[in-house]
Image: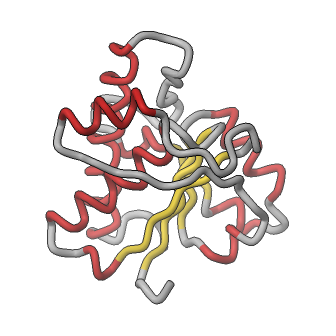
Amino acid sequence: MSKDQRVLFVCLGNIVRSPLAENMFIHLADQAGVLDKYYAESAGTAAYHVGEAPDARMRRVAAGHGLVYSGRARQFEMRDFERFDIIIAMDASNRENILRLARKPEDEAKVRMMREFDLQGSGDDPVPDPYYGGIDGFEQVYQIVARSCQGLLDAMEAGETGD
């Protein structure tokens, strides 16, 4: 991981929201010609889906927008505080679970909310988990994540993320 800035996206199971955000961020950075500056991964706060592929419904919605991705779920680890410059939580529950593992103020300072970077949301708004709902929820999450990842990339490019 020799990239300048390293970002970790975190949701509950690491099969819907965070892998979408990881791959969306990489896609947007690549489109902007700045991928060489960034490294992105995703993780979940729970071990429910470790080793599983991203949710097929989310991948179908993303593919409909031209974003094709794969990967395997993993659980957030304490060492992620050392490995990443910014840790993006999808909702308040994920943020609290991450903060429980923080050992020092510098760890806590790395944790941000995804919707802080969404011009149509606020930092306290969650990226909803569509897992138990219909396909419309996956489309809504796609749109939120796309906007938020673009806002995050713009903020990082402008040096506004506190790194």
Q: Residue 71: horizontal and vertical position, in percent?
A: 48, 55
Q: Is residue 139 left or right of residue 7?
A: left
Name the foreground residue: 139 vs 83. 139
Residue at point 69% right, 69% down? 81
Q: Is residue 144 left or right of residue 106?
A: left
- What is the quadrant of residue 96 in the picture? top right
The image's colouring method is: secondary structure
| Figure check: 39 above or below 51 | below
Q: How many marks?
A: 0
Q: Is residue 108 left or right of residue 119?
A: right
Name the foreground residue: 123 vs 92. 92
Name the foreground residue: 35 vs 68. 68
Residue at point 52% right, 53% down? 9
Q: Is residue 159 left or right of residue 51?
A: left
Q: Residue 37: horizontal and vertical position, in percent?
A: 32, 80
Name the foreground residue: 64 vs 160. 64
Query: Seen from this angle, which residue lies furthest top?
Result: 134
- What is the quadrant of residue 23 in the picture? bottom left
Residue at point 57% right, 58% down? 87
| Figure check: 153 above or below 44 | below
- What is the quadrant of residue 63 in the picture? top left
Q: Residue 109: horizontal and vertical position, in percent?
A: 64, 62
Residue at point 41% right, 84% down? 4
